[in-house]
Amino acid sequence: MSFHYILHESAQADYETSLKWYVDRSRQAAENFVTAVENGLHLICNNPTRWRNTYRHFYEINLKNYPFSIVYAIDEGQKMVIVTAIYHHKRNPRRKYRKL
């Protein structure tokens, strides 16, 4: 029962900003960040309800070796995972859960 995913525009902006930061410092770190995000998305799509339901209808999974979480909501009807944020752990936690 595999789901598909989409990145909300704010999650896409988070991802691009973070990736640019890593590219500016180390090409290898940037490549590993991309791999960590892709692995996280793959795990989510295979079983989206496995990860912790942290707030209302939002779920999240921590990335391995990076201080980020992928925050997402699930649309069961369309078998879709909507990624709302790729959230850095040092940011303001009040902005972690964005309205769709």
Image (cartoon, rainbow, N blue to C red):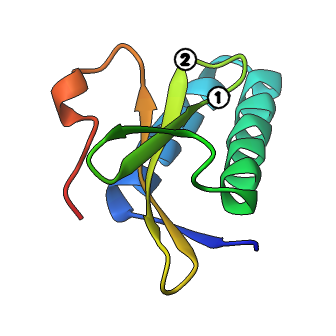
> Whole-percent x and y of residue 57?
32, 54
- Disc 2 residue type? Pro
For the residue pair 83 and 59, the one nearer the viewer reads as 59
14 sits to left or right of 55:
right
- Residue 76, how many percent across, how many down? 50, 76
Amino acid at the residue labelled 1: Leu
Secondary structure type for disc 1: loop
**Residue on which disc 1 sits:** 63
Check residue 7 in the rendering and tell me which mark sits there, or answer none.
none
How many angstroms separate mark 1 from mark 2 (CA)? 7 Å
Determine the residue positioned at 67% across, 72% down: 3
Image quarter in which the C terminus is found = bottom left
Residue 98 as seen in the image, left or right of residue 9: left
Q: Which residue is mark 2?
A: 67
Percent x, y of residue 41: 67, 52
Asked if the residues shown at circle 1 and circle 2 are in contact, with their CB atoms under 8 angstroms apart, the answer is yes
The reply to whether residue 85 is visible in this rendering is: no
